[in-house]
């Protein structure tokens, strides 16, 4: 939940932005592209899960912002 909130933080939320933000976050959370594995190395238990979600949320937010700045999505 924290990662999704980070992805949508500060975005004028339309249903398109909410849907794209959700799918971006979920894809990043599932696929775990770099740099996500760099932050979750080791055995830290629950903290590793939260950090994983936060980093996926930040990456999702950056991608969503770039899509909006370059007007690749409506809004």
Image: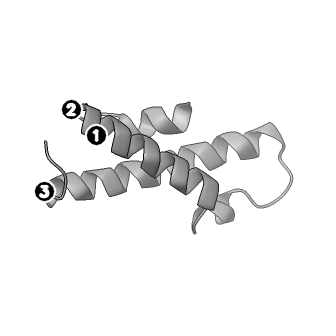
**Which of the two discs, 2 and 3, labels the residue nearer the N terminus?**
2
Residues tagged 2 and 3 counted as in contact (Cβ below 8 A): no
CB contact under 8 Å: marks 1 and 2: yes
**Residue holding disc 1:** 17
Residue 60, horizontal then vertical, whole percent: 42, 51
Of mark 1 and mark 3, the one earlier in the sequence is 1
Residue matched to label 3 = 71
Q: Along the horizontal axis of the image, is 20 left or right of 49?
A: left
Image: 43 above or below 19: below
Quarter of the view holding residue 12: top left
| Residue in the picture at 44% in, 41% down | 22
Q: Quadrant of the C terminus?
A: top left
Label 1 secondary element: helix
Residue, disc 2: 12
| Category of crowding for the residue at label 2, using alpha-carbon neighbours closer than 10 angstroms: few (below 14), some (14–19), many (at least 20) | few
Q: Earlier in the sequence, mark 1 or mark 2?
A: 2
- Give coordinates of residue 27: x percent, y percent: 53, 54
| Position of 14 relative to 31 (above/below) | above
Say whether residue 16 is left or right of residue 31: left
Point out residue 42 in the picture as x, y percentages from the top left corner. 83, 58
What's the distance in space between the residues labelled 1 and 2, CA to CA? Answer: 8 Å
Q: How is the image coloured?
A: one colour
Indicate the quadrant containing the N terminus: top left, top right, bottom left or bottom right.
top right
Q: Quadrant of residue 45?
A: top right
- Residue at mark 2 to residue at mark 3: CA–CA distance: 14 Å
Against 56, residue 9 (above or below) is above
Residue 46 horizontal side relative to residue 15, left or right: right
At label 3, counting other C-alpha atoms closer than 10 Å, the crowd grade (few under 14, some 14-19, many 20 or more) is few
């Amino acid at each position: 939940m924290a990662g999704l909130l980070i992805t949508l933080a500060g975005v004028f939320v339309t249903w398109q932005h909410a849907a794209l933000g959700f799918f971006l976050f979920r894809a990043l959370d599932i696929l775990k592209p770099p740099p996500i594995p760099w932050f979750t190395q080791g055995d830290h238990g629950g903290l590793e899960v939260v950090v994983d979600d936060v980093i996926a949320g930040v990456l999702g937010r950056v991608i969503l912002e770039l899509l909006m700045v370059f007007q690749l999505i409506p809004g």
